[in-house]
Structures are given as structure tokens and as C-alpha cells.
Image (cartoon, grey):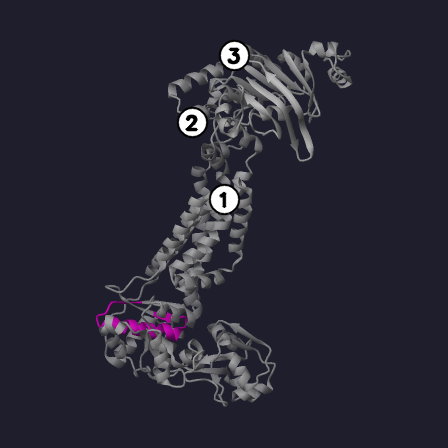
Amino acid sequence: MNRLARVALALVWALAAFSSAPARGEEPIVVGSKNFTEAVVLGEVARVLLVEAGVPASHRRALGGTRIVFNALVSGEIDVYAEYTGTLSHEILASQRIDDDSALRAALAERGLVMSRPLGFQDNYALGMVRERASRLGITKISDLRQHADLALRFGNEFLDRADGWPGLRDRYRLPHRDVRGVEHELAYRGLAAGSVDVTDLYTTDAEIAYYDLTALEDDLDYFPRYHAVLLYRAVLAEEAPEAVAALKRIEGAIDEGAMIAMNARVKIDGAPEARVAADFLADHLQLYVDVVADGRLQRLVRHTGEHLALVGVSLTAAVLCAIPLGILAAHRQRIGTFVLGAVGVAQTIPALALLVVMIPLLGIGAGPAVVALFLYSLLPIVRNTHAGITGIPTSLRESAEALGLEPWPRLRLIEAPLAAPSILAGIKTAAVINVGAATLGALIGAGGYGQPILTGIRLDDTGLILEGAIPAAMLALATQWLFDRGERFVVPRGLRIATHGGAGHDAG
Amino acid sequence: MLELREVSKRFGALPALEHCNLSLEPGRTTVLIGPSGCGKSTMLRLMIGLQIPDEGSVLFEGESLTRERLTAARRRMGYVIQDGGLFPHLSARQDVTLMARQLSWPAERIAARVSELAELTHFPTSGLDRYPTQLSGGQQQRVGLMRALMLDPEVLLLDEPLGSLDPMTRFDLQRDLKQVFAALGKTVVLVTHDLAEAAFFGDHIVLLRRGRIVQRGTLAEMIRAPADDFVQRFVQAQRSPLGAGDLM
């Protein structure tokens, strides 16, 4: 048990080390971005600026919501990302009193962060309705909503929860609505178009405002703060990579609202890659020319397959190495067994999303927490089947092995393990298939894999892109199943695969 | 050789054996007999340490059979159960030689011993590489016997070895078993509920009832001088094949 516990602990450490970000040195500058189009475009702009200035840079795109990305910056997993002043003062630093720009800069400095000057545009929150419906109901400003308590309000999940979002808005305007729910921001637009949603939160630079012919309701009580776009970067960057900071500063004041809306529209409406859009903007406005190497579909597929296989392979291997000994232990020590089966059962009931989010403070973002979550998920089927496989061995066989004078270890190796092999293998198969599916969720926290195109596809409302992740994920699950069915003949002893009384013939005895 | 001294065993509230004393003399065949649930199998299982007595002790060569000495003692005993207890993932040969291989016997010695045992138990050499599901019930019992005899143990314990065989197979195997016992001169304990079988094998029969030994001796003695009513009824309860009244 002791040795086992130590192995498990070592494994967790190894996984933790695997996930933590490397120190600077020759490492490229890591740009991060939040999980919406504008943020990804600005991330690409930052990356292209750096690359053009000869600074090696990479972009970890759409890592998650504000909290996740901000924390990743504080912990040094990323070096820079695009943020909004309103979000900083009203959400991230809401517990502090921040009245002006210098107070904000001071508060950020305490955390080792620096904010660039504004990039030139505001992306404010607003409430939006379909223009035609709003005029029919006579709604032009937010206070008008008070007279229409039966409207269906759908807000992005972040807006619904954050202090400067719906709760404050409701209190300020005393809005009586009951039909208020959270929904993926991109999907709310489609709901508006389909008529199932009446009001949603808008970002004023969203391309969809023009596309769906929406109107932004006037904020007549002046509730929403101003959201100037800025780049937020780690203060140490000024010493470690001054040329990077200099390159980034070139974008200050260079993007006006019209330019940002146009860029968003090219990505979301025309389906252009963010890298292309960012490069074109820099070429047109700053005369910076950079070759954009957009991955082809095949290259993306290869990359996502590699990432997905790595997530599944590492987590499943670790799970097999831990779960089989645990299952064997559980089968031989009843009291420990009850505890072990209970514990892995509980791990299984934690929703995947919750598990991933809980891992972030411990292991940061990226593959590390995803691997640990998948590892925990894979434990139960293997532990349970190992336990069942061994306890299911008929008493007569168990006792025969004992009566022969076999010591416990050879008994396990020569008798119990081969007899339990079909059950253990079935458990690993179940775990693997679940794992392949669950690994798509890893993209939510920047772990890559097939979930990446699925999430991006949802964000861009691009079914082709969704299928680019969904189809290979399904195929991989099927292939995994097939592989394990094939593998049975190598793992399950021959004697157990002979079902019939072949060649018994007449009773010779 | 093997001795049970004042042994008691309970399963929950149910007493399986109460204050039993039994001493096995080397080279003799002892038959444990009695109705279902009388404790005869439990007695055998105590001898090979599959059960630990609640009270009293099991002695092997005069020393108590403790957990530490158990493994070594088991390698000097052979144990055969009703359905053979063959491992489904091993061929007959692998099963029979399992323990010898584990003890790193040289291959030639193992091969020699297997052919010797196959001949002794009348097991066809062609069946050695078959798996249990490919063997008949009688053949499985012969393999079980070979496995028990592989390390040439001093004691052979058989728990209703012929219980699930058809009458013809059973008849042949009874004869073969008796020949094996006679040829090897081993200390044998055989559990059965069939009086005819007991009489066929045993010079020494131990009759149990509700966890107690009620009489021991030869069948003739039990018929001539039954210890109590139960013994009398038990020895008379077996029908002659000719249907003409009692056995004998």
C-alpha cells in the first residue's frame, strides 16, 4: 500500500511538472487570448507584431474566460493578452476601489502586470434586440424593458454572473424579468434571429449587430462602464524582452472601432482565419508585412490528432498503471476495497467541466489539468473491472491455487491475473472510449485536441469546423473499441477463448 | 503424519465440527463419510489449511500447521476436488507442471514425471495439450489427480473426487484410483457420501454426523456393532443394485 501510494504521488507530481510552463530564456513570447473572436483576433495581431519584429512568439488561443486567462498571465503561463479596462476595474479587481486610470495601473503593478495605452476602440456591453421587434414594441432604451416583463433574456454566461453584468444591470434598472438564462454568446445571436430570444448582451464591436440587423438599446441610466481595449502584459517583459514590448506598443491607438468591427466581420461572417485578418490589418494600417502560414485542413487534423492522442495516451497509461494495482488491492483487502471503490466512484461523479476548472488553480491551463482530469475519469472502470475480475474467480479455482502451495505473488501472476484478464481488458476498453470522448473537453482549458475545432466551430458558427473535430473524435472512439477487440486475442489466454468442448469425444475415463 | 486434535469449527452460528480428534497413519487410506453437512469436507479443508480451526489444532508431522508453515506443508500434500478445479487458462500439461515449474525443476525431470503420471492415471498423452473445456469430466479428474501427485506428496486429500461423474466413468476411475493408492502407498484421505465407494477404498472409515465423529473402523464393524441408531440407519440406507434388500 505504502509503495503504491508513493507511486501514485510521484505520478501526480510528474503530471504537474508536465503541465507547468517553462521559464523564459530562448522560449518564445506566449500570447494568450480569451475565448471569443475579438480576443483571438487581437491575440493574432499581437503575435504578428512580435514575429514581424523578430521576436519568437506563439499564440495559445481561446484559453477560456476572463478568470482563466488573467490567472494564466499572473502565473506566467502566458506573457500578454488583450483585455478591457472595464473588465479589469469592475470584474477582476472589483474588490478594490479603482476610480481612474492611475489607480488601475497601480493595482496591476502590485500583481506584476502592465497595461498598454488603449488600442483605440471601445468594446462596450450593450443590450441588443432585433431592430424590427424593438421598434414594434416601442423599445429604444433599457428602461423601456421594465414595461415588458415577459421578454426572454439570454445572456452570455460570463455576463450573467459577473458583477458588472446582469446582476448590477437588473438592480440599477429594477428589471422585473424572470425568463433569464445563460447561453453561449454566439448561440444567443442565432436565437435572436430565430425569434426564440428577445434580448441579449452585445459587444458593441460584434459583427453580428449589422449582420442580424440588431439595435443596441440606449444605456439611459449610464450603467455600463467604458471598455477600452488594451494589451495586458507581465512587467518583467520590459527587462527580459524589451524588443517585444516595443513591438507591442506599435498597436497602441491604431485600431478604431470601425476597423475592429470589420476584422470581427471578416472572421465571423466571411470565415477568414484570424491570422490572415490580423496580418491584413497590420499591412494596411501599419505597413507591416508578414507571411501568414495558415494551417491547411490536413495539417490541423494531424496536429489535433497528435494532441488528442497525447492527452488520451498519457492519461490512460497512467490510469492503467494505477488502477490495476488498486483493483487488485481492493479485491484482496475488503476494507480497503470498499474505500477505494467508493473513492474512484466519487471521482467519476464529478462533472468533467467542474473537474477541469478545479484543476486550474493547481496545475494551470493546458494539457496538465486535462490529463489529470482524464486520468481520474479513467480510474473507475478499470478499478471496478479489475476488482470484479478477481473476486469473480470461482472459489474452487482460488482454493486450488492456494492448496497447490503457490505463494500470493505467483498466485496473482499465474492464476488470478490471467483469469481476470478479460474483465480487466473490458474495463480498460470502457475507460479508453470514455477518455477519447472526454478529451474533447480539454480544449476548454487550452489543452488542444479534437475539442479545439469543435469549440472554434461553435464560436464561429462554422459547422464544417465543428465536424472537423467531431468526426475524427468519433472515429477515434470506434477505432479504440476495434483495437481493444482485436487486442483481446493477445491478452486473454487461449484456454479462456475456447468456448466449446472441442474434441472431448467419448468419455475415456 | 496428520492429526486433528480437539478441533472445532463454526460458520457463523452453525457448528461444522465439534471437538474432533483424528490421526492419520502413514500409508493408510482413510475415508470420511456421512450425510450432507456432517462436516466431512470441512475436516479435509482444515487439513490443507483452507480453513483455520476455531479451537484445537491441526498437526502436520507433530507440529502445529501455522500460517508460516502452511505453504511448505501444502507442497507435501496433494488436493483433489470434485470438479477437478483445473485452471481454464492452462492446458493439462501446464496445469500439472505449474508448481514444479514454479520450483524450477529441470525440464527433463518435469517431462519424465508427467509421462510417468500419465501412465499411472491412464491419461492419454495426446490430451496433455488440451484445455479443460476440451476434456471430459473423467479426464479432468485424472488431470486433477496428476496435478496433486506431481510433487510426489506424502499425503493425498480427495474431496468427493468422483462425485459428479457418470456411473461408468466413475466405476473405471474408482478402480484406477485404488490401483494408484496401492502402487504409491501414500497416506490418503477421501471424502465421499457413497457407502459402497467408502467400502471399496477404505480400510479405515470415519462416519460423521452433525460435526461429530460417531464411529470409526471398517464397514463390517459398523454393520455388526453400530455405535447408535444413526449408524445403523446410515449403513442400511444404501440399496443393493439388485434391489433385493440391503447391502451385504
- Mark 2 lies on a secondary structure that is helix
Q: Amino acid at mark 3?
A: Leu
Task: Tell me where residue A243 sits by quadrant.
Answer: bottom left
Task: Tell me where residue A94 sits by quadrant.
Answer: bottom left
Name the residue rendered at 56%, 89% in the picture: A138
Asked if marks 2 and 3 fall on the same chain, the answer is yes
| Region of the chain picked out in magenta, as a range | A32-58
Q: Which residue is mark 2?
A: B102
Gap in angstroms between the C-alphas marked 2 and 1: 25 Å
Neighbour class for label 1 at 10 Å: few (<14), some, many (≥20)? Answer: many
The one nearer the camera, B87 or A79, is: A79
Relative image position of residue B222 (x, y in whole percent)? 72, 12
Asked if marks 3 and 1 fall on the same chain, the answer is no
Relative placement, left or right, of A67 versus A58 is: right
Asked if marks 2 and 1 fall on the same chain, the answer is no
Q: Looking at the rendered structure, which numbered label has been put on residue B184?
A: 3
Considering only vertical position in the picture, is A6 above or below A46? above
Relative image position of residue A332 (x, y in whole percent)? 52, 39
Relative placement, left or right, of A102 versus B222 is: left
Decide whether residue B232 is among the magenta residues. Answer: no
Gap in angstroms between the C-alphas marked 3 and 1: 44 Å
Q: Which residue is mark 1?
A: A327
Neighbour class for label 2 at 10 Å: few (<14), some, many (≥20)? Answer: few
Tag 2 and tag 3, C-beta contact below 8 Å: no
- Can residue A136 be seen in this snapshot? no
- Mark 1 lies on a secondary structure that is helix
The one nearer the camera, A482 or B186, is: B186
Q: How many marks?
A: 3
Q: Amino acid at mark 2?
A: Gln
| Lower position in the chain sequence, tag 2 or tag 3 | 2
Relative image position of residue A26 (x, y in whole percent)? 23, 63
